Amino acid sequence: MAKIDRLFEAMLTNSASDLHIAEGQPPKYRIHGTVTPTSDPPLDGTMLGSMLSEICDPERWETFLNVGDLDFAYALG
């Protein structure tokens, strides 16, 4: 199980449509159109890199490292 799966599972439990993650901020969910922060602590760059590189193919990860932004789909299971 990927580290980020815990956030996705909570996303499903909370009927969220999106997960927003950014360095220095806690994870946030979009629930019924409103972006709501979780009670998790802010994510640092190391944690973000660890979570995302685990589920992102190498080419897209390289794009993220060069551009600083990444938008992609991921399926649990």
Image (cartoon, rainbow, N blue to C red):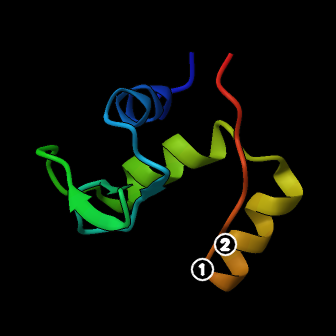
Relative to 54, residue 28 above or below: below
Residue sitting farthest toward the front: 32
Circle 2: residue type: Leu
Residue of label 1: 68
Q: Which image quarter holds the C terminus?
A: top right
Instruction: Name the foreground residue: 47 vs 38.
Output: 38
Say what secondary structure mark 1 lies in: loop
- For the image, the number of numbered tags is 2
The residue under the point 51% across, 41% down is 51
Circle 1: residue type: Gly
The residue under the point 60% across, 80% down is 68
Instruction: Name the foreground residue: 1 vs 75.
Output: 75
The residue under the point 66% across, 72% down is 65
> Does residue 31 appear left or right of residue 2 in this picture?
left
Residue of label 2: 65
Q: Which image quarter holds the N terminus?
A: top right
Residue 31 screen position, x and y as percent: 34, 54
> Does residue 37 appear left or right of residue 75 in this picture?
left
Circles 2 and 1: CB atoms closer than 8 Å: yes
Q: Quadrant of residue 21?
A: bottom left
